């Protein structure tokens, strides 16, 4: 790999400029203000499939109190899952 010192310094400077806004907001403690608008069914389905795998089918879902509750199925087994942020899903009920 033939990299010149000048190119390396330019790359480091560019990376620091791109990361600076994120670092500054983290240092001040600002959080992204997520609107309480309901997520679309496709967003919920993508999130569940990313968490549990592609073999799951999403039945229905509801949103209340800042939590999303969904019914999913995999090979005839039904699960009820809950998530506060569409990232961390927990199984709260299972029927085999």
Image: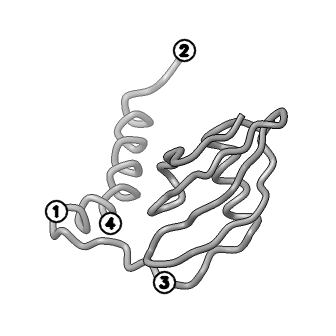
Instruction: Look at mark 4 in the image and give the residue it sits on.
Output: 21
Secondary structure of the residue carrying numbered label 4:
helix
Q: Nearer the viewer, residue 70 or 17?
A: 70
Q: Earlier in the sequence, mark 3 or mark 4?
A: 4
Q: Position of residue 89 (x, y in %)?
A: 52, 49
Secondary structure of the residue carrying numbered label 2:
loop
Q: CA distance from mark 2 to mark 1?
A: 36 Å
- Labelled disc at residue 36: 3
Instruction: Look at mark 1 in the image and give the residue it sits on.
Output: 27
Q: Nearest to the eye among marks 4 and 2: give it.
A: 4
Q: Nearest to the eye among marks 3 and 2: give it.
A: 3
Instruction: Look at mark 2 in the image and give the residue it sits on.
Output: 1
Callout 3 crowding tier (Cα within 10 Å): few <14, some 14–19, many ≥20: few
Residue occupying the point 50% across, 58% down: 83
Q: Earlier in the sequence, mark 1 or mark 4?
A: 4
Q: Nearest to the eye among marks 1 and 3: give it.
A: 3
- Specify the quadrant that holds the N terminus: top right
Residue occupying the point 64% across, 53% down: 47
Question: Seen in the image, is 5 located left or right of residue 62?
Answer: left
């Amino acid at each position: 790999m033939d990299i010149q010192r000048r190119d390396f310094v330019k790359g480091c400077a560019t990376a620091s400029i791109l990361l600076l806004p994120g670092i500054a907001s983290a240092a001040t403690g600002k959080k992204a203000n997520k609107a309480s608008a309901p997520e679309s069914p496709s967003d919920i389905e993508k999130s569940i499939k990313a968490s549990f795998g592609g073999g799951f089918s999403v039945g229905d879902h509801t949103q209340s109190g800042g939590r999303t509750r969904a019914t999913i199925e995999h090979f005839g087994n039904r699960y009820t899952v809950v998530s506060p942020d569409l990232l961390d899903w927990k199984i709260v009920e299972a029927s085999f």
